[in-house]
Amino acid sequence: MRNYELRTELRALLHLPLYHLTFSFLAFAVFLGKLQSRRLDLDPWKGSLAALHLAVFSTVALTLHSVWHALAGAPVAVQALCWSALLLTFFGSWVAAILRPQRWWEWLRSNFAWLSVALFLGALSLGVIEASNWLWKPLASGTMKIAVFLLGAIYDDVSVNFENYQLGTGSFYITIEPGCSGYEGIGLILIFTLLYLWLRRDQLRFPQALLLLPLGCLVNWLINGLRIAALVVIGTNFSPYLAMKGFHSQAGWLAFIATSAGLVLAVEHGRVFHSGPVETVEEAQEAVYPAAPFLLPLLAVLLGTMLGAAFTTDFPLLYPVRIVFGVMALLLFLPNYRQLFGRPNWGRALLVGVAVYVIWIALVKSAPADTVWPLVSPGLAWTWIAFRVLGSSIVVPLVEELAFRGYLQRRLQSEDFEMVVPEKTGWLALGGSSLMFGLLHQDLLAAVLAGLAYGHLYRKGGLSECTIAHGVTNFLISVQVLALGHWSLWV
């Protein structure tokens, strides 16, 4: 690249990537400022310094290479002075474009504390990727020690090799790879906690609430040790294939969900981090969360799916678990649904459902797949099929339409989604919700097109019609599976 040697020299001169630090610092500054409900109170000059910064930026971009060669033979002190002046001019003109120079000192004094924290966090963030390359080894060692302690209470033949990161029993061994050491879970919990802090910034006490970041990381790491121990138990006592194929792939997500949910519940019902009175249990039960009736049923189904996948291998034998979870969540909010579903136009809903089925079958090719018959007795097999047909034709359409059409399509239209009537959702909201609907499914293109059809029908006839259409599509797929043996459409 044209100015690669220049950027390398600047990094060596300044001992850190200044442009990365700048953007990291700004991101944390905005984040921390918003957490404290602070106004940035910027006071830009009209046009003049903005134009000056644009001129400086253009000049630097056009002459940087020439300046680099001109200074190549100069003494180091002269180079340092020139580059410092150039950087100060560049960043100074940029800052002056958003805040009058005569207010710099006053503004810096009044915001010094949280700006210092933002600068520290910005500098710290630069080493996150590099740190993960060596951090996984001490994390893995700690994870192994936790797992060995837990396994020692169950087995007498626990063996461990800290050099190769292996542990297990006499009949089952595992090797802890970087992804299993815990740092991926720590990254996820950090992102979740930052989002939670942002969403609840008006109710939480800062800077005390920032302690949730290391607390969440510690809890997730401890649970990761429990996950590794459970993996060994399943592989030793039940099935090595189940341990590595099913449980191993899902247990990390289950640990993340458990940590996140526990953290939120502890904070919401505790008094340590709240800035005001904390809700009692009765008040929390009476609180109104408008999105809950639309989203929690889908989350319950997804949780059931993950639990089922953790304790099965290739075939979704525990499919009924997700349906039971979904029905329980729907029953919990049953009174909330009475006004959402009106009288449908059955002809239009059936027509759309059949059309989507035709599109789906045209795009999603059937292939050989496992069936339920060799796995269980005939009675249990027919029970599983009943859950599969009724679940995919009734429960799943209802749960998904509530989430993607009833909530997301309206939420993308307006923050106050409850006030948005279906016919007022625009094309952007329709496209965005359809894309998210597609990402939930394995066959992205077919699912996005289905989402567009259901979303457009939602604008015409509300939740009743799009739910019926969705159910018709899934029922026809079930008929094809059972009649023609195209089990790949189910699994």
Image (cartoon, helix red, strand yellow):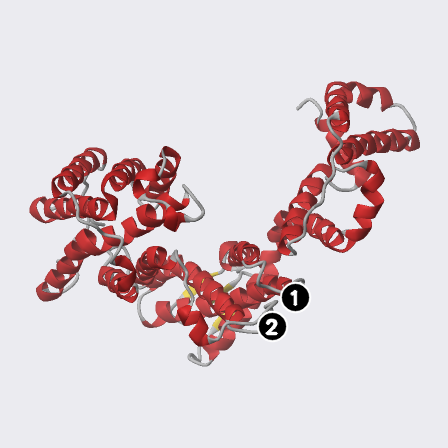
Mark 1 residue type? Gln
Q: Nearer the viewer, residue 473 or 237?
A: 473
Residue 208 tag number: 1
Question: Do the residues bearing badges 2 and 1 touch, measured as CB atoms within 8 Å?
Answer: yes
Q: Which residue is mark 2?
A: 272
**With respect to residue 47, does 356 lie above or below?**
below
Image x and y of residue 357, in percent: 17, 39
The residue located at (42%, 80%) in the rendering is: 154
Q: Position of residue 71 (x, y in %)?
A: 86, 23
- Answer with left or right where residue 241 lies relative to residue 155: left
Density class for disc 1 (Cα within 10 Å; few <14, some 14-19, many ≥20) is few
Q: Locate residue 458 relative to residue 103 in the image: left or right.
A: left
Q: Nearer the viewer, residue 190 or 5?
A: 190
Which residue is at 17% across, 52% downward?
393
Res 256 visible: yes
User: Residue 12, relative to residue 331: is it above or below?
Assistant: above
Residue type of the residue flagged with mark 2: Val
**Quadrant that contains the N terminus:** top right
Q: Nearer the viewer, residue 398 or 244?
A: 398
| Residue name at image x 74 percent, y 29 percent | 46
